[in-house]
Amino acid sequence: MSAEAASSLQRNQVDLLEFIDWSGVECLNQNSSHSLPNALKQGYREDEGLNLESDADEQLLIYIPFNQVVKIHSAVIQGPEEEGPKLVKLFANREHMGFSNVNDFPPSDTIVLSEDNLKGKPVLLKYVKFQNVRSLTIFIEDNQSGSEISKVQKIALFGTTVETTDMKGLKKIEDH
């Protein structure tokens, strides 16, 4: 990540990668030989030779559940200049979405990725819409050139965990 990209993240924001519930992650319309882990998993997403590719057309529908409640501040969605995503709709806490019903729900945020975004500049999200997120659905509606295949090199989500009380850490107050 460039220094400019890093500076646009607030100091307390972290990569939410470690909070993803990998057992529930799904991607509809992915090419089986260029699947979601290439863009989402640590190590894979840093390799420019690996990417997520759409299969039948340019659309991708990605479901990312978290293992605890998070607040999402910004996202990095990188891709090549031509086949990189353009119009991206984000849905907080919407489960079981498919291509048949994705347009039935208003998105929590809609972003249009610029050339700078495709190179790694984070997109700031409508933070108030992403306060208590248990899952995120990312709908890549089209790509920069209108071609049949969309390619995503990296998806990184930045934010914080929602503070919850650790009941095991509480100690009984003794009377003196």
Image (cartoon, rainbow, N blue to C red):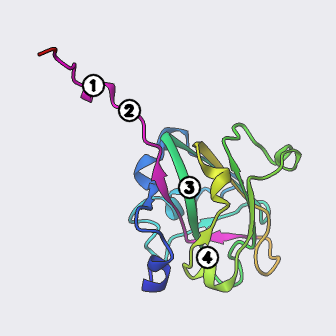
The residue under label 1 is which amino acid type? Lys
Q: Is residue 152 magenta?
A: yes
Element carrying mark 2: loop
Q: Earlier in the sequence, mark 4 or mark 1?
A: 4
Q: Residue at x 38, y 32 (%)?
A: 165
Where is residue 136 drawn, in percent x and y? 63, 48
Left or right: residue 85 versus residue 23 is right
Element carrying mark 4: loop
Q: Which disc is residue 55 wearing?
A: none
- Dot 4: within a 10 Å radius of its alpha carbon, few (fewer than 14), some, or many (20 or more) residues? many
- Evaluate if marks 2 and 4 touch, with contact meaning CB atoms under 8 Å apart: no
Left or right: residue 5 versus residue 32 is left
- Dot 2: within a 10 Å radius of its alpha carbon, few (fewer than 14), some, or many (20 or more) residues? few
Disc 3 marks which residue?
72
Query: Which one is in front in this view, the residue at disc 3 or the one at disc 2?
Result: 2
Left or right: residue 24 versus residue 30 is left
Q: CA distance from mark 4 to mark 3?
A: 21 Å
Disc 1 marks which residue?
168
The residue under label 3 is which amino acid type? Ile
Q: Earlier in the sequence, mark 4 or mark 3?
A: 3
Query: Which one is in front in this view, the residue at disc 4 or the one at disc 1?
Result: 1
Q: Is residue 155 above or below residue 84?
A: above
Where is residue 26 drawn, in percent x and y? 61, 46
Q: Is residue 122 above or below residue 13?
A: below
Q: Which disc is residue 79 wearing?
A: 4
Where is residue 168 drawn, in percent x and y? 27, 25
Residue 31 visible? The answer is no
- Dot 3: within a 10 Å radius of its alpha carbon, few (fewer than 14), some, or many (20 or more) residues? many
Q: Earlier in the sequence, mark 3 or mark 2?
A: 3
Magenta region, residue range: 149-174
Disc 2 marks which residue?
165
